[in-house]
Amino acid sequence: MSIYESEIKAIEASLPDQAYTTSGIDPENVARMRIQNRFQTGLDIARYTAKIMREDMAAYDQDPTQYTQSLGCWHGFIGQQKMISIKKHFGTTKGRYLYLSGWMVAAMRSEFGPLPDQSMHEKTAVPALIEELYTFLRQADARELRELYGAVDAAKASNNKSAYESAIKAVDEFETHVVPIIADIDAGFGNEEATYLLAKKMIEAGAACIQIENQVSDAKQCGHQDGKVTVPHEDFIAKLKAVRHAFLELGVEDGVIVARTDSLGAGLTQKIPVSTSENDLASQYTDFVDGEPVTSLDQTDAGDFLLNQNGQVIKAARLPNGLFKFKASSNEDRVVLDCITSLQNGADLLWIETEKPHVQQIAGMVNRIRAVVPDAKLVYNNSPSFNWTLNFRQQVYESMVKAGKDVTAYDQDDLMSSAYDHTDLGLEADRRIRSFQANGSKEAGIFHHLITLPTYHTAALSTDELAKDYFGDQAMLAYVAGVQRTEIRESLASVKHQDMAGSNIGDDHKTYFSGGNALRAAGENNTMNQF
């Protein structure tokens, strides 16, 4: 017996035992509603998607070509459309996640209006967006299953046993649109207790994976801006433990923690930790603090900070705002120590924020980390903050020079020029961009590739194109030719926007409840019938 039919039988058996009247309730309708709403709570989603991530991580360990990907979202509809499109084009959502970007929440979801990525937005906006994303993904399930139920009904009506069995099989094998979300908790929005409380809210909303960074919470900056200030390892470890406790308290034992280090671009620390032994984490951290040797107190002024660094007393380099400077060129060493320490203290995945997309640079750090933790894996930000074209054309230019090739046809100061689009340099750069994710996963331990802000930029670009033509001489043709006609020809579900908003699902429910008396919206006068 199919899962679908078993659900109907179970409901039939349970209805007579209910205290309330069951007159007029069709068990098949109830079964359909239950299947359309298989996830009752956010914790159901978190447990389900955490298991998916763990399986994907294990698969990647066996075969680095099995990396995963995601795109960032700032609205439930955007996340829904991503997964609908993925199922449409690839037939499965396997290996495809969603990313919830703190940058996007700050810029798009704050009640203060657009904000920079500095943890100034309402922290409750993060779990609220997680819940919204999963609400839209569950609605996508309900809509697609409704179409499958239609095939069941058609097969019944025609008394076609073969078609009925095929339709039931499609319901049983339906793949949900609900996928893992990697959710950004920034630097934890306060102390470790604040991090724990917010992590709980995020997990209860459905988050199976939480990404946290090692910056000072109240001085947090976007990873691709200047002025970043990191915290000592003990402080960061406390927040890793806070997130893990939240997962375990809520029964999400497979919950995934991504530990992000911003040390590659951070040259400052706010706090000097206290060492208790010669080679503890605190002393390793303070070894990176910059300063000048002193042999006498006469070399110091009021307010100077003296530090015993490997037996040598130094006057720590300190800015007027009280922040301490790290030694120049210590960044990669700090990244490696950060990553090893995080993996040894509860993190599952790493995130190294870099200033450019360069496989060899990433691999150089990961190989050092893997010398200590062999199965270290990365989540990598394929960021729109990088000028991908310029970066890769520069890499190709440099490799051509190194190989002794003639580069006189190219102006190194103008490599963005469209004149180079179809040259050997431009084509090779594009080839490297196309293969960056595959190469990064094979050579640099990148398990997951994400783009943080794709729909921020696609929305801006498509709106610019529509506005230019609609308010210009194309008028309504700009929308019809540039949007609607393409939607129809590409079979985008969004062309039937009433259906996407749940109108047909609502009609089904009205029929369940009111039978033939239901006032349905999908009658002959519904203009959606034109599609």
Image (cartoon, rainbow, N blue to C red):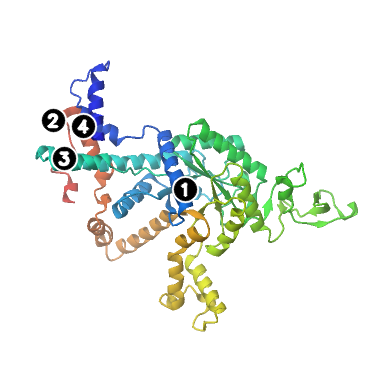
**Residue denoted by label 2:** 516
Question: Residue 453 vs residue 322: left or right?
Answer: left
Which quadrant would residue 352 be assigned to in this image? bottom right
Which quadrant would residue 427 be assigned to in this image? bottom left
Q: Nearer the viewer, mark 4 or mark 3?
A: 3
When the figure is inspected, residue 518 is found, relative to residue 144, above or below; the finding is above
Contact check, label 1 and label 4, Cβ < 8 Å: no
User: Which disc, if any, is residue 57?
Assistant: 1
Q: Quadrant of the N terminus?
A: top left
Q: Nearer the viewer, mark 1 or mark 4?
A: 1
Amino acid carrying label 3: it is Tyr
**Residue denoted by label 3:** 164
* Label 1 SS: helix
Question: Residue 111 vs residue 304: left or right?
Answer: left
At x 24%, y 44%, the residue is 499
User: Which disc, if any, is residue 510?
Assistant: 4
Amino acid carrying label 2: it is Gly
Amino acid carrying label 1: it is Met
Q: Nearer the viewer, mark 2 or mark 1?
A: 1
Q: Nearer the viewer, residue 221 or 252?
A: 252
Amino acid carrying label 4: it is Lys
Measure the C-alpha gap from mark 3 to mark 1. 38 Å
Measure the C-alpha gap from mark 4 to mark 2. 9 Å
**Mark 4 vs mark 2: which is more N-terminal?**
4
Question: Residue 333 vs residue 48: left or right?
Answer: right
